[in-house]
Image: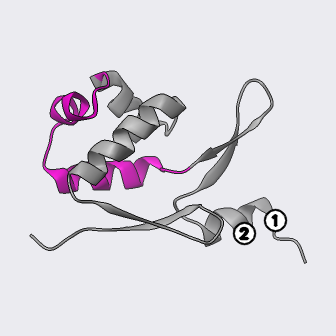
Amino acid sequence: MEASKSEFRNQNDLAEPRRRKSNCLQLIILKPSVARAARAYTGLSHIGFAKLAGVAPRTISRLENEGNVSDKALAKILGAFTEKGIIWEYDQWGRMVGMKFPMQ
């Protein structure tokens, strides 16, 4: 039995398929609410986190509001989160399913 799109979104809170203008399917692996929570954990402002990640502050804002950034920017952002101690968890298919914050 195949799961519907709405069931997929409910089962995997951090991953959400989205159509790009080119009609190809893009997997959004970091929802805006999760990005906001992860940045809040780092204790950095939009500007401070953007400098750490090596992206423009507008990119961080776009990620946290729309969830839509380039693959290159997303890689930099995920790397910066990892540098700040956030541990990403993945399922057997490579989809992000959660994150852990080390004790401070």
What colour scheme was applied to this rendering of the protein?
Answer: one colour
**Main secondary structure of the magenta stretch:** helix
Q: Residue furthest bottom?
A: 1
Q: Residue at horizontal 15%, vertical 33%?
A: 48
Label ID, residue 74: none
Residue 44: within the magenta? yes
| Pointer 2 local density, CA inside 10 Å: few below 14, some 14–19, many at least 20 | few
Element type at marker 1? loop
Q: Looking at this view, is 21 or 100 the one in front?
A: 100
Find out whether the residues at labels 2 and 1 contact each other: C-beta distance under 8 Å: yes
Distance Cα–Cα, label 2 vs label 1:
5 Å
What is the x, y in percent for residue 58? 34, 23
What is the x, y in percent for residue 101? 25, 68
Residue 52 is at least partly visible in this image: yes
In this picture, which residue range is highlighted in magenta? Answer: 29-56
Task: Identify the residue position indicated by label 2 in the image.
Answer: 7
What is the x, y in percent for residue 14? 52, 59
Residue 14: within the magenta? no
Q: Is residue 60 above or below residue 28?
A: above
Q: Amino acid at mark 2?
A: Glu
Q: Is residue 52 above or below residue 90?
A: above
What is the x, y in percent for residue 76? 37, 36
Q: Residue at horizontal 23%, vertical 50%?
A: 83
Element type at marker 2? helix
Quadrant holding the C terminus: bottom left
Residue 65 is at least partly visible in this image: no
Q: Residue at horizontal 78%, vertical 34%?
A: 24
Quadrant holding the N terminus: bottom right
Task: Identify the residue position indicated by label 1 in the image.
Answer: 4
| 81 to the left or right of 97 | left
Q: Amino acid at mark 1?
A: Ser
Q: Is residue 57 above or below residue 97?
A: above
